[in-house]
Image (tube, grey):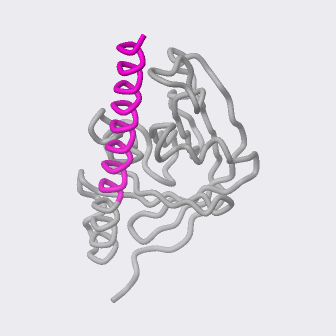
Amino acid sequence: MRRTALGLISLGILVAGVGVALRFEGSRGQSIAEGRWRVQEAIPGLQHLPESVTRISFPSQGDVYFVTDGASNQSLLLGPARLTWSAASGQTGNCIILAHRDTHFRVLRDVRKNDRVVLERGGQRFEYKIVSMKVVSANDDRFFRSTNDPVLTLVTCYPFSYLGRAPKRYIVRAELLAQEGSRRQA
């Protein structure tokens, strides 16, 4: 009985430690991405590099994150990532951004229909309105398909409180409302 109790306590400490390490890594990744975003916004032309960064904000929730191009296991530990084959911010097509449900895209559990999502990149600001939220199976790829209109698709695992590999995906779809700004003149 005592061994079982010690084993469970050890397992709990291990799981808590992994959680703290993942949050630290995510926070560190966002700090690095924010620094890169500030540099690319200050120097014309840098936003077109493969390492470019987009700022995403959820005004109703007060959350801001920095999105890198190219989703991989490593990049998703650091923050949200845009699938490189998807449309860029504000372009015609489906701009797809993914992030983990227990770190950066935990905010998606609080978004509502008609909330705004703002993407900023290259001196431009793109405002989207959330039109739908849906839970789908992990192998449902309908929301990854190309579109003829400029839309934003945010993807995270579901349920939000699930331990381990979640069996479903939470999809937030938003339509482009407005595009503002252009490269600032020095």
Q: Where 34 sits versus 162, above or below?
A: below
Residue sitting nearer the eye, 132 or 103 = 103
Q: Where 33 sits versus 72, above or below?
A: below
Residue at 56% across, 60% down: 63
- Most prominent secondary structure in the magenta stretch? helix
Question: 117 left or right of 122?
Answer: right
Tell me where residue 42 appears, x and y as whole percent.
31, 77
Q: Quadrant of the N terminus?
A: top left
Question: 152 left or right of 72?
Answer: right
The number of numbered badges drawn on the structure is: 0
Q: Quadrant of the C terminus?
A: bottom left
Q: Which contiguous range is marked in magenta? A: 1-30
Residue sitting nearer the eye, 77 or 71 = 77
Tell me where residue 10 appears, x and y as whole percent.
34, 26
Q: Where 175 sits versus 183, above or below?
A: above
6 within the magenta span:
yes
Tell me where residue 4 appears, x and y as whole percent.
40, 13
Residue at 23% across, 56% down: 49
Residue at 68% across, 47% down: 110
Question: 81 left or right of 130?
Answer: left
Residue sitting nearer the eye, 146 or 28 = 28
**Residue 148 found in image quarter:** top right
